Structure formats: structure tokens, C-alpha cells
Image: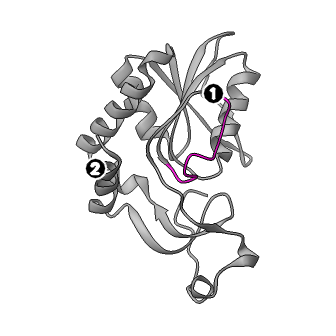
Amino acid sequence: MTESEVLQIFRGSGALLDGHFVLRSGLHSRQYFQCALALQQMPVVERLGAELAGKARHLGAVTVVSPAMGGLVLGQEVARQLGLRFIFAEKDDGKLVLRRGFKIAPGEKILVVEDVVTKGGRVQETIDIVRAHGGQIAGIAMAVDRSGGTVSFGVPTFSLISLQVETFEADKLPPDLARIAAVKPGSK
């Protein structure tokens, strides 16, 4: 699957939005990937999951972990495609944690799967959780890398599409973007 085919899936499903958006990172952008719109169709989930699973198969992970909410659907599908266990980290008092009795064994090889990464905050929180529990990060897989490949986690990292999407600090908006009301469409 080429990057243009992946981009077409997002455009065709209405998951690639244009306007003025405030990202989870606090940065502002003209584009927003609302992956949930693409991932509501199971054939799309299966196809994207298969592509990510194929890129990460050689890492030898035994468990997939995703940060909630964005990474859940894709992470579970990657785990299914690889025949692995799936767990997730979720917010508790504004911070990601493992709950629901999920455990990570010392040395357990973990693949982190996320839908969209801009600065990588949620992925880094997830990595920190895995390491705090004694797990080993085998790699990171994501559908969309909005950093254009500049975000680094120090482990093998794979994406289906990598774009350098302009982002701006709130106090440094270009005039055309400042004239448009900002919306925050993602999970809070």
C-alpha cells in the first residue's frame, strides 16, 4: 500500500479535515486527521492494520499496547493480525496508566501502536509506562506521522504515511489561520 493510497483512504472517508485545529499537543494546524472516521469501516481497519503488522512483524513483539482513545482500534487490529495480546493505557486524573488488571512481565517485548503522532507525547507516555513495568519496547507503529519523520523515540518506528504538516504555537499564528475560529476535534 502506497502513501497516496493511505492518504486517499483518509480523504475518501472524510477523516482528513481542513480548517483551524488545536491539536492535543496544544499546537495549531490547518489540517487534522480524525482517524476514527476512517476506522469506523472494518475493511479499512483490517487493511491498515495488516499494513502496520507487516512492517512490525520482524520485531518479535509478544504484546501490543496503545494509548486510549486514538490507538485502540488500530492497535487491537495489529495485535489480531500478528496473533498477539493487546492491552491499552488510559487516562486516570489526566495521566496515562495501565488499569483493568493489565500486567507487563519483566523483559516482555512490546509494540506500541498509535493512530496519529505529531510530537509523540502520548506515545512517549506509553513507552514510559512499559519501561516502568519492566517491559522492553520493540518498536512503534502508527498510521500517520505528522512530523514528517522528525519525531524520534530511539526504537524502530514505522508509519503508513509521513507528512510534514505545518503546526504553529498559539501566539504565532499566521494571519489567515488567526481569522478562522479554532476547533479541537480530538479526544480531550
Q: Nearer the viewer, residue 144 or 35?
A: 144
The numbered dot on residue 5 is: 2
Dot 2 falls on a residue whose secondary structure is: helix
Quarter of the image for the N terminus: give it: top left
Q: Which residue sits at x=66%, y=35%?
A: 153
Q: Quick check: 178 above or below 76? A: below
Q: Which residues are magenta?
A: 145-154
Q: Answer above or below: position of 162 versus 136.
A: below
Q: Determine the residue positioned at 42% across, 24% down.
A: 79
Q: Residue furthest top?
A: 106
Q: Is residue 75 left or right of residue 156?
A: left
Count of residue discs: 2
**Residue 107 image point, x, y percent:** 66, 10
What percent of the width, then of the height, locates residue 117?
56, 48
Disc marking residue 155: 1
Q: Is residue 113 above or below residue 120?
A: above
